[in-house]
Image (cartoon, grey):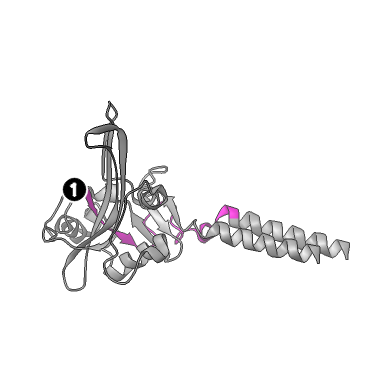
Amino acid sequence: MINKIKLAFLCFAIFASQAHAEFTDIDWKVAGDSAATYDSTSNLEWLKLTQTDNMSIADVQAELALGSDGQFYGWRLPTENEVETMMTNMFGSLISEGNSNRTWGSNQSSIYSAFANAFHWNYAYAKTGYPAQYDYRSYGLYSTESGETLMSGVRYTNYPKTGQNHKRVYTTYLYEDHASDSYTEDFSNTSYGVFLVSDGGFTINSPALNAVSNVSVPFVSSLSLIGLLGLRRRKSD
């Protein structure tokens, strides 16, 4: 009975540890460049937004049209549903049907860090002299089936309170399916990149090229532990 309880607890711990390990850095052109991220839930590879920084959707489309001569050969523009699914995989219940813009008057590092770790910051302003000021943004553009341009991403600001430099004001922003009159296929800005996705095979360590990498090292190790526990139980019977 004790061994069964141990096994059940171990299984729970293993799968609980995997719940927040869905996005993994992978290399695109050079080993160690970490220019892409892999979503193990959808099995899609996403190019980090810094690779399309300050480009418009039209700019990216022009590169894609060049095929193997373009700088984004092997990548494609994602569908609206793929972006929404990626955001749901990352943020869970924080994402709802339709526009899911949210703002917190606090430092919600678990929110902005999740997105920034996967896609990097497009814009980072840091004034370290007194009073310090910080503004970080990671915004991704994409098109809907109807041709509308939308944005999903995060922003974090840390500013002194007006007239009270010794007090800080923290704000965290989460954008999903965010619309703006300024967003068109020709819109570009240094705080924005364009989402690009691959079905696999165009990154150096793509899971599509190496099936073993679909199973994380911690998970393989955990399976080994289960096997050892089972072996120990059989020997004790």
Say above or below: 190 vs 16: above
Task: Pick the residue in front: 203 or 21.
Answer: 21
Q: Residues within 10 Å of mark 1 (few under 14, many from 20)?
A: some
- The residue at 40%/60% (across/down) is 91
Location of residue 75 (image quadrant): bottom left
Q: Which residue is pictured at 31% across the width and 72% down the height?
A: 97
For this view, does 61 lie left or right of residue 32? left
Q: Residue 180: give x, y in percent of width and height.
A: 15, 60
Q: Which residues are magenta?
A: 191-218
Secondary structure of the residue carrying numbered label 1: loop
Quarter in which the N terminus is drawn = bottom right
The question of residue 37 being in magenta is answered with no
- Nearest the eye: 62 or 153: 153
Q: Quadrant of the C terminus?
A: bottom right
List the residue tagged with mark 1: 54
In this rendering, would 210 be left or right of 133?
Answer: right
